[in-house]
Amino acid sequence: MAGSIRGAGRMGNIRWLMVGLAFAAAAVSYLDRSNISIAAPLLKADLGISQRELGLVFSAFVFGYALTQPIAGRLADRFGARRTVAIGLVWWSVLTAATAMISTTMAGAFGMLLLVRGLLGVGEAVIFPASNRLVASWIPAHERGLANGLIFAGVGVGAGIAPPLITTIMLAWDWRAAFWASAAIGLVMLAIWLTFVRDTPERHPLVGAGEREHIASHSVAADPAAPVKLAPWRRIIFHRQIALLTLAYICFGYVAYIFFTWFFTYLSSVRGLDLKSSGIYAMLPFIAMAIASPLSGFISDRLVPRFGRRIGRCVPAAIGMALAGLFVALATQVQDPRLAAVILALGSGSLYLSQSAFWTLSADIGGHSAGSVSGLMNMGNQLGGATVAAITPILAETLGWSGSFFCASAAALVGAAAWLFIDPDASLKLD
C-alpha cells in the first residue's frame, strides 16, 4: 500500500494544471463577453442606441462566435490548443479594446459596434473547442467529467466577476475604462498560457513517466506534428448522437444566454434594482454555475463505474435541464426582485449540472476529431444564444418579460427530453 501511495505521488498532476489554465482562459473569455451586458445602460445612453439595437449588438457577438465554432474546432484538431487559444486571446483582447474606442462622435457608431462585437465573437470561438482538444489529449476518460466541469466553472467565475468589477470601474471612471481593463487582463492571461501550456504530455517538461503512462493508457494521442486522420464533416454532421447533443445544446444556449445578455438589464430596468444592487445580485447565477459545473462532473465520474455511462452522464444532464426549466418559470411568479434573482440563480445552477456531460461525451465520441465535434455542437449552443439575445426584447414587448422567460423554460424542457435519447457509448467511426 505504501509503495502504491509513493507511486501515485510521483505520478504528478500536470494534467490538472492544464485544466486549471483552461479554466482561467474560460473565465477571461466570459469576462470579455459579459462586460457589455453590465455596461449596457451607460453604453446605450452614451452611443444613443435603442433597446432593440442593443439586442442586435448582443446577437452580433453570438453569431460571430457561433458560425466559426466548427472552424475553431478543426483548427484546434490540426494545430493544437496552445497556439489556437493564444491567437484567440490576442484577437479578443484587441477587439475588447476597440470597443472602448468607439466614440459618440463617430459616424456610424452603431454599425461599428456591431462589427467589433461580431469580430470579437469570431476570436472567442476557439476557447472551448480547443479546451476540449486539450482534455482529449491530457485527461483520461474516467476523469473527464470533473475536468470539463472545472473548465466550465470558469464561465461562472468570469461572468460572476464581471458585474462587481465592471460596475466598480464604471462608477469610478466610465464604461470605456472597464473595457480597457478587460483587454489588459486578456493579455496577462496570454503570457501565462504561452508559458505553461503544451499540447501533449510528451511535450511538457514537467510531466513525469508515471503521469505520462497514466494519461496514455486512457486518452487520445494528439500530437499536432503527427499525421492524424480526422473524420469528414459529412460523417460528423449526420451522426445521430452528435445531432442529439447539438439539439440539446441549442436549448441549453437559449436558456444560458438569458443570463449572459439580459439578466442584468432585467434586474435593473424591469425589477427596479439600483446599479450597485444589480451588480451584486447579478453575480448569483454565475456563482451557481461555477459551483454546479465541477460538482456535476465530479458526481458523474463516480456514477459511471457503478451504474454505467447512461446513468452517469445522461440522466444527471436531463434532470439538470428539467430543473432549470422549472426554476426559470417559477421566478416569473415571484414579486420580490431579490427572491426572483435567487430562484433564477437556482435555475442557472441546475442548467449547468448538464454542462460537463456535453463536453465529456463530445470528447469521447469525437476522439481525434473532438475539437471538430465539440465545435459543431457548440455552434448549436451559440445559435440558441444568438436567438434569445435578439428576440428577448421583442418577446418582452409582445408577451411581457414573464412570457420571454416561459419560452426559455420550454427550451430547457426540450433539451432535457433530448438527453433521454442520447447513447453515450457511441463513437465516431472512421472505418
Image (spheres, rainbow, N blue to C red):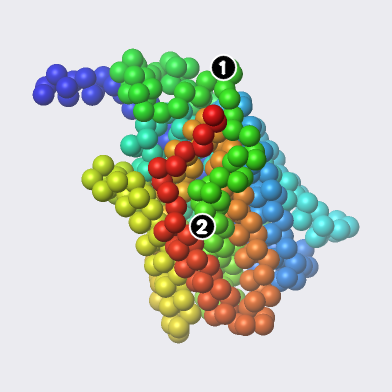
Residue 96 vertical placement versus 160 (above, below): above
Position of the N terminus, as image quadrant, is top left
What x and y, as percent, mark residue 273? 52, 75
Disc 2 marks a residue whose amino acid type is: Ala
Secondary structure category for the residue under label 1: loop
Q: Which mark is residue 218?
A: none
Dots 1 and 2: beta carbons under 8 Å? no
Check disc 1: other Cα within 10 Å, few if <14, some if 14-19, many if 20+: few
Question: What residue sits right under mark 1 in the picture?
Answer: 226
Looking at the rendered structure, the number of numbered marks drawn on it comes to: 2
For residue 357, above or below residue 208: below
What residue do we see at 56% from left, 17% from top?
A: 226
Residue at image position (38%, 39%) is 144
Query: Is residue 407 in view from this perspective?
Result: yes
- With 226 as the anchor, is 4 left or right in this view? left
Residue that appears at 53% across and 49% down: 240
The residue carrying mark 2 is 248
Q: Residues within 10 Å of mark 2 (few under 14, many from 20)?
A: many
Question: Where's residue 409, x and y in %?
Answer: 50, 71
Given the current orientation, which residue lies at the most extreme front position?
Answer: 431
Asked if residue 352 shows in the view, the reply is no
Residue sitting farthest toward the left: 1
Instruction: Give the CA distance from mark 1 to mark 2.
Output: 34 Å
Looking at the picture, which amino acid does disc 1 mark?
A: Ala
Residue 373 sits in quarter: top right
